[in-house]
Amino acid sequence: MAAPKDLRFTKTHEWLRRDGDVVTIGISDHAQNELGDITYVELPEPGDAVSRNEPFGVVESVKAASDVFAPVDGEVVERNESVVEAPDLVNRSPYEQAWLLKIRLNDPDQVDLLMDAPAYDVYAETAKH
Amino acid sequence: MAVEPLIHELSKPGRRAVRIPAPDVPETPLPQELLRDGLDWPEASEIDVIRHYTRLSQKNHAIDINTYPLGSCTMKYNPKINEAVARYPGFAGIHPLQDPATVQGALELMVELQEMLAEISGFAAVTLQPAAGAHGELTGVLIMRAYHRSRGDTGRTKILVPDSAHGTNPATAVMAGFEVVTIPSDARGNVDLEQIRVHAGPDTAGLMITNPNTLGLWDEHIAEVVRVVHEAGGLVYNDGANFNAILGIARPGDLGIDVMHYNLHKTFSTPHGGGGPGSGPVGVRADLAEFLPGPIVRRVDGDEPRYEWFQPARSVGRLHTFHGNFGMHVRAYCYIRMHGAAGLRLVSEDAVLNANYLLASLRDRFDVAYDRTCMHEFVLSGNRQKRNGVRTLDIAKRLLDFGLHPPTTYFPLIVPEAIMIEPTETESKESLDYLIAALRQIADEAEQTPEVVTGAPHRTEYKRLDEVAANRTLNLRWTRPVEPAPEAAAAD
């Protein structure tokens, strides 16, 4: 599936959707496809700080446990409890229902450092080979 | 599908295997506070128990049944003489609290094993305490930490770990209080020497490297890598998981490595993979010997040599109760003695030859991540097959239909759809050819009839298991089903 045009992406396959000062983040369709069936998601609590390029949580599949990295610095304002309850949401709806966190941005300029959707599609395609 | 019941489900109240005769010595009751009621242990006859466990063993795969090419795990044949010797009453019937004067033979075996391991690897001293590879890693990194501290060098907080490493390497470094710096691999599968140069510095406690690495490749810059880390004041730890590839050919100590663990259950043919227990001795260069965990057994020369325990001067402390997994020491000792120096070299030569024969016979049908002459194992990628919807997981499942244990899959993490194959030296050409034929047939099927592969296994007693459900709803403990109340039963 082509990456939605309104999202930005990291090299570690997280996506970000900006809405004013708050961004929503998750993992890409490519990432969930590579990981296989997701069995477990571990997320920080609202109020916790996250730092750009640092792990904020863990996504576990039948194949591997992987850190997920924050695309920006900020503070967690909300976490998606339904994805913790039903981790397979990540496989079924990576860009919509399976968002992981909402984060209040510290520095909006950090969003511009991320790849746009066409650039990410090329990047993810290359990563396969 | 015949599901073997649990032993609890076979239980019948009052059924038993043996009746223990009445004691002919006075009974000593256990203290009341240690007694519990309601343990709900299974009750079964001897033949029920034997049949149950024999049936379970028939559902299992083992190296004694067929090829087991599980990369990085080195599932080589475990010679039966090891087992016979380990059962000698002088080894099996002794207790670690016995007076050392009464177990001199066992202590002599431990001293000789320490000396043989040191000689094979080029180190000065060895501890046999650690119970497995990762335990050996922790021992080694604690020694590195103690070394830096003993010199007042407290600013060394980081350990460099290549991105191809076993996960236990970074985990060990963190357990020992260090921060991990991940070093990428270069285009030929070596650790990136330039990145080592960038990251090695006054805060570097050391490097944990696996050589040959988890791609089955010899690091082409190992001498320079070691030199750079040493010049920065760090130590170099070698993860000895792949030591079985270089016995009698290269010695890590001669390469400048400071600390290394041995996996007796890989290189020296002691059992593992659920059978175990493991054993992960650690070797060090001369000036690190005083930090080894104690006590260590040593020889006291004289007309009649004696063997005794001593505590290294600045020991990091005890890492295992008593003296490690002694039964494994006996088996490894037996293996080394049975082979001798020339035989051990042949072990490694055959392991490397077998792996390269497999690689040469498969590289036209599978992508090869880093296509070089390999050591004792190599890593294929299932990328080509994935384009037809056949994943590495499916290839692994399909191999079960051939009576083969699948290779390691999805490791190392830097290779997409990784298939990691290690035949070991103990497979014959015929069994290698059978594995090649199976993988080539699966490659054909992936192109022509992918549903045969994605639907595998077809011939096993249990078909594709629901791994997602197994992961999400772990069920590891039997609980007695609630008996239906008499009224409910009557209502039926």
Image (tube, rainbow, N blue to C red):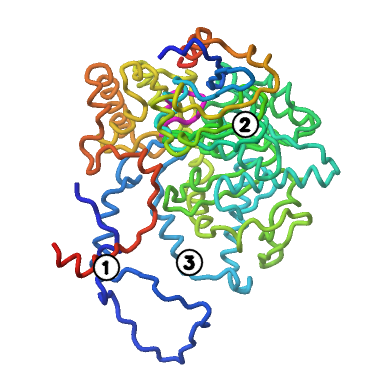
Q: Is residue B14 above or below residue B182?
A: below
Query: What is the C-alpha distance between the residues marked 2 and 1?
Result: 53 Å
Nearest the eye: B99 or A19: A19
Amino acid, disc 2:
Val
Nearest the eye: A60 or B172: A60
Pointer 2 residue: A76
Pointer 1 residue: B11
Disc 2 packing (10 Å; few <14; some 14–19; many ≥20): many
Which of pointers 3 and 1 indicates the residue nearer the eye? 1
Query: What is the C-alpha distance between the residues marked 3 and 2?
Result: 58 Å
Q: Is residue B194 above or below residue B290?
A: above
Q: Quadrant of residue B9?
A: bottom left
Pointer 3 residue: B92
Magenta stretch, residue numbers = B408-418
Q: Which quarter of the rendered picture does the C terminus of chain B lie within?
A: bottom left
Residue placed furthest toward the right: B152
Q: Position of residue B231 (x, y in %)?
A: 79, 28
- In-image side of B275 versus A72 (left or right): left
